[in-house]
Amino acid sequence: MGEGMLIAGHIVGADEAFDVVDPATGLAFATAPDCSAAQLDEVIAAAERAFPAWARDITVRRQVLRACADAVRTHADELGRLICREQGRPLPKAIGEVMGAARWFEHTAGIELPVEVIRDDEAMHISVHHRPLGVVAGIAPWNYPVISAVWKIAPALLAGNCMVLKPSPFTPLATLRLGAILKDIIPAGVLAIVSGGDGLGRALAGHAAIRKISLTGSIEAGKSVAAAAAADLKRVTLELGGNDAAIVLDDVDPDAIAEKLFWGAFQNSGQVCCAIKRLYVHEAVHDRVTDALLARVNTASVGNGFADGIDLGPLSTKPQFDRVRALTEDARDAGARLLGEAAVPEGSGYFLPPRLVTGLDDTASLVAEEQFGPLLPILPFRDEAEVLARVNATKFGLSGSVWSGSADRATDLAAAMESGTVWINQHLSLLPIAPVGGHKWSGIGVENGLWGLLAYTDLQTISVARA
């Protein structure tokens, strides 16, 4: 079983291939093509040929994106099953990702590229326009392989660019299949989807014809892409993850927020860039919030994503599985209490139970680093000035949340948090109308909404003399 790459309007293989592992078993179940240097050159040459005609008519581009949305919806079950197999998420949530990708295609198709007139008098007319960059590249992550790809594909194409998209080598199959589904909808060369390892990513970042790189990945990967892009003055959008803090104030109802906190932290087994990774709880409600959340953690169903009634699947990759286990042991060695009784399947799959962790301070690795797994440290605080200082004392700044019985009180506190998004009495509420991006080391630029679309354009000023 395997999927081919979308190159110049055709689905093709490669001379070399690599294994794709099912995280529920730890065993390879398919292969994916390893794009060669010659194939990458062919991809980019086809994109350069396709660009002038594609950039010409935004009405056609809108029609194409809406047709993409319809096609993705039609194939939601098929794509969801591939995500479940290669990434591990429970099937209903995997299908939900695909339906979200269709929604992003549809919403993006309707965004207007603004034209701003900044002078209009008897002497001069000056207008500011947004023009496509040319051939751009996207590098998608393994935690949400389809919707993260569409976050890049949809705005890039609407803006008039051609795109080369590379999925993670851990989860290439659903994204490659997406290419096959869209092959007869998007003109040849406008979109390419090619698979491979880190070498392919470096080749994309270093190719002179690529005018922008959009990466969702680790800080280390972001630094590498930024360095490669700098040599050729490529534009970059980098979404590099975070160590998101949630602040629970003393006026909450613990039982009312426990379910939302659970999913804010443990969605996708904690493998979400903007999931709650540090939970700061006012000392007046600390024990009650911990008890309410623990009751939900203890009832979590962990297992193969194809089984019925599963809340959480396995960790998606062996390196991530090993890292979270190491952080678990590090927390134990530091004297932490690990709370949670959810059972996990036996065998070689990458399963870990969701757990709350108490007794750590802010210097512990589990608190100071982005763990990306089903561990949630809970830390007490006494006053708002103290917790703000602790929350902001990090190089990360992707997102966060504040929980309170007073939305006004929470909003005032949120304004002082150093992060790109702050939610009030919710977490992980991602919408196609709202930009997502990080402060500090959590990234450069944003995705989604008008702001994400404009990131795929250059400004052009047209000045007309009238006298």
Image (cartoon, grey):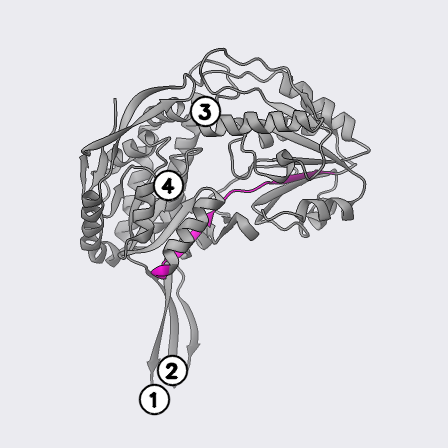
Which span is picked out in magenta? 231-248
Residue at label 3?
Answer: 89
Q: Which mark is residue 467?
A: 1
- Ranked by sequence position, the earlier of labels 2 and 1 is 2
In the image, what residue type sits under mark 3?
A: Arg
In the rendering, at what x and y percent does residue 455 appear?
41, 56
Residue at label 2?
Answer: 124
- Residues under numbered marks 1 and 3 in contact, where contact means CB atoms less than 8 Å apart: no
- Residues under numbered marks 4 and 1 in contact, where contact means CB atoms less than 8 Å apart: no
Residue at label 4?
Answer: 150
- Ranked by sequence position, the earlier of labels 4 and 3 is 3
Q: Is residue 383 magenta?
A: no
- Residues under numbered marks 2 and 1 in contact, where contact means CB atoms less than 8 Å apart: yes
The quarter of the rendered structure image containing the N terminus is top left
- Ranked by sequence position, the earlier of labels 2 and 4 is 2
In the image, what residue type sits under mark 2?
A: Met
- Mark 2 packing: few (<14 Cα in 10 Å), some, or many (20+)? few
